[in-house]
Image (cartoon, helix red, strand yellow):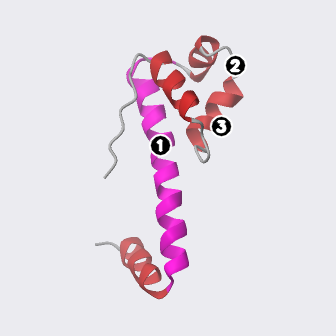
Amino acid sequence: MDDLDRYIKKRKKQSPQFEKDYDKGYEQFKIGILLKQARLEAGLTQEQVAKRLQTKKSAISRIENHAEDIRLSTLVNYAQAVGKRLQFDIS
């Protein structure tokens, strides 16, 4: 465990609000990373995905970098645009 991991673990123990906010933020960050990874695996640029979704490159960038409050329909459309399908696991 490195210093950052120890710090995060310590802060989570000290503050339930920090833990809640951190976990929520991490999940949103992870969604954006997964979308970007799928786009790159498909060999597509943000501009190409934007064209497929009939939107602007800046919208794709926003989706990949700030995935908070993203609509389910947007996730489905993005996945289709990069040749993937959306799959959920509720646990």
Crowding at mark 3 (Cα within 10 Å: few <14, some 14-19, many 20+): few
Which residue has dot 1 on it?
Answer: 31
Element at label 3: helix
Residue picked out by circle 2: 55
Specify the amino acid type for callout 2.
Answer: Thr
- Give me the residue at 44% from left, 79% from top: 12
Which element is circle 1 on? Answer: helix
Under mark 3, the amino acid is Arg
On residue 60, the disc is: none
The image shows residue 20 at horizontal and vertical percentages of 50, 70
Q: First in sequence: mark 3 or mark 2? A: 2
In the shown orientation, is residue 52 left or right of residue 58?
Answer: left
Q: Is residue 1 magenta?
A: no
Point out the stretch of residues depicted in magenta. Answer: 15-44
State the residue position of label 3.
Answer: 62
Q: Which quadrant holds residue 6?
A: bottom left
Mark 2: which secondary structure?
Answer: loop
| Cα–Cα gap, marks 1 and 2 | 20 Å
Q: Is residue 51 above or below residue 91?
A: above
Q: Answer above or below: position of 71 versus 42.
A: below
The residue positioned 51% from the left and 50% from the top of the image is 29
Q: Within 10 angstroms of label 1, few (less than 14), some, or many (20 or more) residues?
A: some
Q: Are marks 1 and 3 in contact (CB under 8 Å)?
A: no
Coordinates of residue 39 in the picture (x, y in percent): 46, 25
Query: How many other residues sit within 10 Å of disc 2, few (<14), some (14-19) or many (≥20)?
Result: few
Residue reaching furthest to the bottom? 14
